[in-house]
Each structure stands twice: as C-alpha cells, then as structure tokens.
Amino acid sequence: GAVVSQHPSRVICKSGTSVKIECRSLDFQATTMFWYRQFPKQSLMLMATSNEGSKATYEQGVEKDKFLINHASLTLSTLTVTSAHPEDSSFYICSAGGRQVNEKLFFGSGTQLSVL
Amino acid sequence: QKEVEQNSGPLSVPEGAIASLNCTYSDRVSQSFFWYRQYSGKSPELIMSIYSNGDKEDGRFTAQLNKASQYVSLLIRDSQPSDSATYLCAVNTGGFKTIFGAGTRLFVKA
C-alpha cells in the first residue's frame, strides 16, 4: 500500500505550549487528508478534513482556533495543537487519500501526545 | 446521519478457527468498503477493500458485500494469535469522505 509518514511519534510537552504534528504522503499526491484523535480503547474520532490549498473543515465540537490545520501542498499537512492542556493528551492520527490510490485511505503511524 | 455499525466485541475464537466480523451501514449510495486492522497503540492498517457484491478473497481474509442488505463482513480463516486486534469497518460515502465503525475487538486464543 501507499506510505504516509507522521512525525513525531511521541511528544511530551508542558501545559500551555504548542505542538506541531506533520503528516506526509511519500508516494502519492494526497488530495485530501484527515485528522483524528483516539482515546484509549475508544474509536477514531474525526477532527477535521483538509483539502490541498483550502481551509480545513472541522467536525462539530472541534475548536478550529485550538487545532490549526494547514495543507499547503499535495504531500504535507500539519496539525498544530495550540496552548495544549492535559485534556488534549491523546493519540492523534492522520490519513491521506488521493485519486492515485482510488479513494483508499492510508494512515500515518500516529502521534501520542502527553501534556503535563 | 450516515452510520457504520459494528459489534464492539470482544469476539473470542480459538486458534485455527474462522473469525467472522460483521458490519452494517446506513447510506445506500456508498460504493467503496474497507476493512482496517488496528493493534493496540498503533494506527489502522488497510487489509481489504471491496467494491461489488459478492466475495473477495486475499490470503486468509475474505470480504463479503451485500449492498441490498447494506452489509459487509470479514472472514479470517485459520485465525492466529497475531490476528488479535481491533477491526474497523469503513465506508466511503463520496469523494474521500470515509465513515468508520467503532471497531470489533478480536481475541484469538492460542
């Protein structure tokens, strides 16, 4: 399958700081990227959908000013958690899709965020 | 509200048995269906895709689709302890918008 790279895999930060997570499609053009969060033993929760060159569409209840998403190119999307708090601690996962992969979604390896 | 429903499990099967995972979806116009496997602490991995009614086999995995009943299933033959994971059913509802089920936890006993 196609490869989606996500960095960092784990980050620990102090409350109040901002954390940037990168998601890259390595061997296809990702027209659309999705960002999810997942709490232990719970299902994926879609946070937002981003299309290259346009503003992200956020799911209901997700604060767009807190979770900044940028999809500046067909291979890179970033999620910035601003002014992180302990309740933002979670597993964040990106996925990417594009015409070259026939609507299939491929996932990054995830980022475990721990806010102290 | 477009939904994808799965039994959360856990589904427990002995090693070597067939594991049967089921999924129903609400949006009749859905055309693409996927099964993902997620190990604890890891991100989902695509294992099967199916687009037309009937069965699709890939190694020990068989996906079954019945659009009239809005039903997708995944069979795992000769289950192994390494198959123990959460299996996510996913339905593409147009463009790249994919709805995920909550997942079924499978436990294969050695």
Image (cartoon, grey):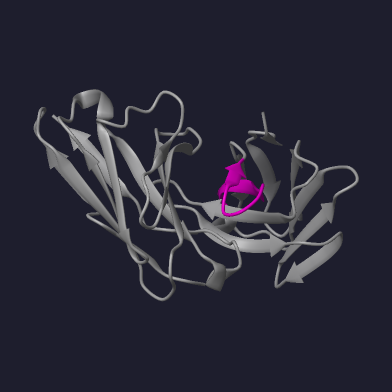
The correct choice, above or below, for A40 with respect to B68 in the image is: above
Q: Is residue A56 visible?
A: yes
Quarter of the figure with residue B10 = top right
Residue A59, image x, y percentages? 46, 32
For residue A25, side relative to residue A99 (left or right): left
The stretch of residues the image draws in magenta is B84-100
Residue extending farthest bottom? A27
Q: How many marks?
A: 0
Task: Please say whether residue A106 is one of the residues in the magenta stretch.
Answer: no
Q: Left or right: A37 with respect to B110?
A: left
Q: Is residue B95 magenta?
A: yes
Residue B87 place in picture, x, y as percent: 60, 48
In the picture as drawn, the residue positioned furthest to the front comes out as A54
Q: Is residue B42 visible?
A: no
Q: Where is residue B75 drawn, in percent x and y? A: 75, 56
Q: Is residue A62 above or below residue A21?
A: above
Q: Is residue A50 above or below residue A30?
A: above
Q: Quadrant of the C terminus of chain A?
A: top left
Q: Residue at x 40, y 34 (%)?
A: A40
Relative image position of residue A94 (x, y in whole percent): 39, 51
Determine the residue located farthest toward the right in the rendered image.
B68
Q: Is residue B63 left or right of residue B80?
A: right
The rendered magenta stretch, by its main secondary structure, is classed as: strand
* Nearer to us in this view, A82 or B74: A82
Q: Nearer the viewer, residue A11 or A79?
A: A79
Is A70 positioned to the left or the right of A51 in the image? left
Identify the residue shown where x is 21% and y is 36%.
A114
Compared with residue A11, is residue B6 higher up or lower down, i.e. above or below?
A: above
Q: Residue, x 28% and y 36% (percent of image)?
A: A67
Which residue is rendered at x = 67% and y = 59% of the image?
B79
